[in-house]
Image: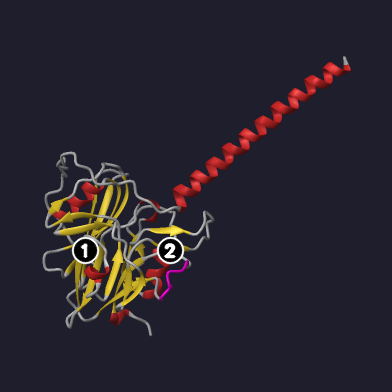
Amino acid sequence: MKQNHFIKHSKTQEKNIVSIKQHFLLILSTTLLISFTFFSCKTTDFHETSPQEQILFSYDEINWIKINEYAHQFDYKFTNKKYFSIVKVNLDSPDLIINIYPEYEQNNKWYKPISVKKYAKKTNSFIAINTTPFRKENILFNSKVKPVGTIISNKKELFPPNEKYSALAIKKTENGYLAKIIETQSNDSLKNYDYTIGGFWTIIQNKKIIPFKKILDTRCAIGTDETNKILYFFIGNNFTYEECAEILLKTGSSDALQFDSGNSSALYVNNKSLLKKTFTRDVAAILGIANISQINY
């Protein structure tokens, strides 16, 4: 009897051990999934060859609200979960300053990320947006980061180009700046610019929308007009990239590209977020624009 009791007890222990292992693996898998979702940098949008569907929006008139002498803003809400903001900035002024994060040469090394909110405040940028996709050194919350794509600041290459993706390139002029969307990052295509900041893919080229898989998410993008003197900053919730492209096209962009989106999405104007969310993720790369008269020396 004792022998049988011992055997029964042993099987119960084995079942408990198996159950504990299963629970541990479930918790570990869930933790890794959450870490990947919130702290990894990725996009699931790829080019597709299916016919492009026209997306119709209900607004007919675009009411631009003045932010300052260089910038105007347009907000639109379809539902509580689907809304966007566009900010257009006229670069044709010598009083503007381009701010790029990271701020120093990193020699292609890992470094600490920063939130768009903190960087905008630090640099007195009246507008600041998350830009380049990035990799994390590990899954820890305070992990260091490294951009996946070009970053050039004041003609110094901070990180090399990635030919898989597009970039925003900015050239300094006597009167301000000129901005252009470069479809493929390369040393040759970027060599004549003072600032470059990588994104994902081009979504508008010569006023033509480029089709992508129709996946809804929080989106970050930027466009340029035909004169290359206007930048259009886009932030929106619950959009596909084709919808972003159509909005940017309708509001004045002739070319546009995707920036790193999802949980990385952030656009601040006068230190205020245009995205209705409480979580602000630290990111690897930021584009900010400041007015020289507002800089505190």
Q: Which residues are magenta?
A: 105-110
The disc at residue 146 is 2
The disc at residue 182 is 1
x, y percent for residue 192: 22, 75
Closer to the chain start, of discs 2 and 1, is 2
x, y percent for residue 279: 44, 54
x, y percent for residue 25: 59, 38
Separation of disc 2 and disc 1 at Cα? 21 Å
- Asked if residue 180 can be seen in this view, the reply is yes
Name the residue at the bottom extreme: 297
In the displayed structure, does residue 57 sit left or right of residue 166? left
Q: Is residue 107 magenta?
A: yes
Establish if 46 lies above or below 70.
above
What's the residue type where badge 1 is placed? Ile
- Asked if residue 270 can be seen in this view, the reply is no
Name the residue at the right extreme: 2
